[in-house]
Amino acid sequence: MNGASTSAVSMTWPWALAGLLVVPLLLVGYRRVLRVQEARRQALAAEGLVMPAPRRSRWRHLGPALLIAALAVLVLSLTRPVASVGEPRREGTVVLAFDVSNSMAAKDVKPTRLDAAKAAARAFVEKQPPSVRIAVVAFGGTALVTQRPTEDKAAVLAAVARLRASGETSLSDGVLGGLSAIVGKPVKPPKDAEAGTADETPIGYHGGTAIVLLTDGEDTTSVDPLTAAELASAAGVRIEPIGLGTPAGTVIEVDGFSVATALDESALKVMAETTGGTYRRASDAASLAAVYDAIELQWTMRTVPHEVTSWVAAVAAMLLLGGATVSVLRQGRVV
């Protein structure tokens, strides 16, 4: 958990503190009453009408002190105090990067690899607190950010529903597309940066973010996905690859041709290890939903204001009750 718990107090109506001016007046009045009572006692004792004053207890002022303190705290409650308290909350950015290549139409995960991924993604989105921003990336031969990071769950679900399988697979573009969604601008691979064709502005550090790579792992390009994974690692972004399909694989029809496709886990495991993520295999929709539940986001402390008038008033009531009780037990009356 990042951050520290903090607490600060402010007042909505600070002018109400003027009511505290009555406290010193009460203290002066109380001392005056004590002097008057003592003078009368001494006068009556001189005439033999009362017994000399007994030894006074040091607790004899406790009841009035509690009553005056209750009044002071009650005045404080009139200011409508607001306490800013640090509260832990789960937050961060998650990019759901969907492989939408032709192989994702395979049915070795029912109903298809892509449809199973979409169903589990919907369940994941519904479970997230409002503090978690979610983005959607579709990648095949290239990557496209179909939904930028947002807390609007309806927009995310709509972006997921629009996904369709077609084309090739580039795992590298899937990662770079996820980074582009997080950074808010296109992110080029390092080799392009060396050639001077990429934006040379650093992408910065983005802790508390994760790219959930939903793919069968079959990369049909010559670009090494490890290069993109290293770039994500340097930016503090975890890659959480989820392998869809079975190692035995199946056969799909693409443009009239029969194409064999199977789960390829090798690159996915290396990408996860490079970024501090975890590779998981999902053989069906139920296990895929469990994978989503295992993804941990960052816990941070956020300062949230809470009006605590009722709590302060409760303290005043307890002081008032205590003062009244002490006064009744000592002298048979409250004042």
Image (cartoon, grey):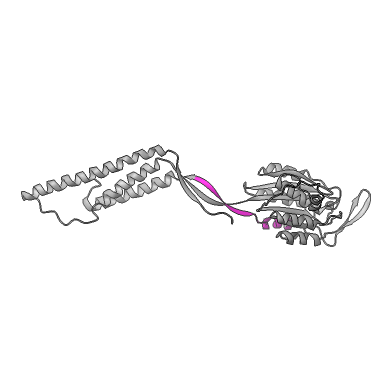
Position of 323 with respect to 177 (left or right) is left
- Residue at 36% x, 47% y: name it: 316
Magenta highlight range:
287-305
What is the quadrant of residue 144 in the picture?
top right
Give the quadrant of the C terminus: top left
Q: Residue at 82%, 48% (x, y): give it.
A: 142
- Please indicate, yes or no, whether residue 31 appears anywhere in the rendered image: yes
Q: Quadrant of the N terminus?
A: bottom right
Q: Nearer the viewer, residue 215 or 287?
A: 215
- Name the residue at the right extreme: 256
Residue 54, given in percent of the width and then of the height, sits at 15, 56
Residue under the image location 32 percent in, 40 percent down: 21
Q: Residue furthest left?
A: 47
The percent coordinates of residue 182 (x first, y second) are 70, 48
Q: Position of residue 129 (x, y in %)?
A: 62, 48
Q: How many marks?
A: 0
Q: Which residue occupies the foreground of this view, 140 or 317?
A: 140
Residue 119: where, in percent of width, then height? 74, 50
252 horizontally vs 186: left or right: right
Regarding residue 111, the answer to whether it shows in the image is: no
- Residue 185 magenta-highlighted: no
